[in-house]
Amino acid sequence: MIGRRGLIALGAVVAGCAGPAEQPRPVMRPFDYSHLTVIQLDVAQVEVVDRWVPPRAPPNVDHRMSVEPREALRRMLTDRVQAWGRQGRARAIIEEASLIEERLPRQTGIGALFSTQPSERYVLTLSVRLEVEGGDGRRGSAQATVTRTRTVLEGTSLAAREAVWYEMLRSAMDDPQGMNVEFEFQVRRALRGFIVPEGAPRPPPGGGIETEELPSPAARPAT
């Protein structure tokens, strides 16, 4: 039978194991890759195609992220893959941009009462494909896939989970084993014959422009 002092001591131990401390929300820096080396393709047109349709239901949680993975991939492809030729076309395809939540089994026993256990595992998968068709009929493709996995402890707040998700995406996109490095490596390996050397002049516009920003009516000169 536990006495009064034992109950007080037990209560102190349980209070000390209440759960992980709240983490501050991370600074959500925008994903921007315009400062990185451009992959110049000998084609007249580059189209970014988003084939990933978020299920927006468990176990997927990518739609709950402050920045969805598909948005980061779209930014990378838009900034880094550019048309540098007069004929042919390329399609930069987002094939997967998922974040899956997996519930972990809880341990039982007396020891489990005094420990904070892992409760969920998150698996981030990014996959893109670049398909090129040259003006001379040549074809080629390159594929890049990156994954990241993290676990969180029971009692982790939503804000702390959002911080974990964001850091997973930032790591998967930007670290030395991330998508930017893997994508460029695969493209230069598999599509070498379609890449225009750095320093080559870009052809004048015409036919290869997918979209074009027009000046506002107020900016047009009077006639």
Image (spheres, rainbow, N blue to C red):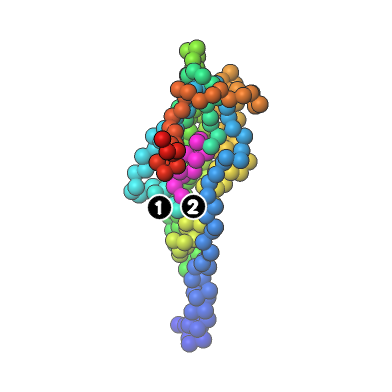
The reply to whether residue 132 is in sight is no
What residue did someone put label 1 on? 64
Mark 1 nearby-residue class (10 Å; few <14, some 14–19, many ≥20)? few
Q: Position of residue 118 (x, y in %)?
A: 49, 58
How many numbered marks, from 0 up?
2
Label 2 close to label 1 by CB (< 8 Å): yes
Position of 64 relative to 212 (above/below): below
Q: Which amino acid lies under the numbered mark 1 shown in the image of this protein?
A: Arg
Magenta residues (range): 67-78
Q: Which mark is residue 165?
A: 2
Residue at the right extreme, as displayed: 199
Residues 105 and 145: in front is 145
Q: Position of residue 88 (x, y in %)?
A: 48, 19
Q: Quadrant of the N terminus?
A: bottom left
Residue situated in front as seen by the camera: 68 or 83: 83
Q: Tell me: 8 left or right of 181.
A: left
For the point 46% across and 50% down, the residue is: 67
Which residue corresponds to the image point at 49% horizontal and 61% vertical from the top-left? 160
For the point 51% across and 52% down, the residue is: 166
Residue 148 on the magenta segment: no
Secondary structure state at the residue bearing disc 1:
helix
Query: Is residue 218 in sight in this rendering?
Result: yes
Helix, strand or loop for the magenta stretch, by majority: helix
Residue 43 location in percent, x, y? Answer: 51, 21
Give the mark nearer the N terminus: 2 vs 1: 1
Tell me the element at label 2: helix
Please give the name of the residue rendered at 58% of the width and 18% of the height, measured from the top-left corner.
193
Camera-side residue of 142 and 99: 142
| Residue 72 magenta | yes
188 to 103, vertically: above or below: above
Residue 178, by quadrant, is top right
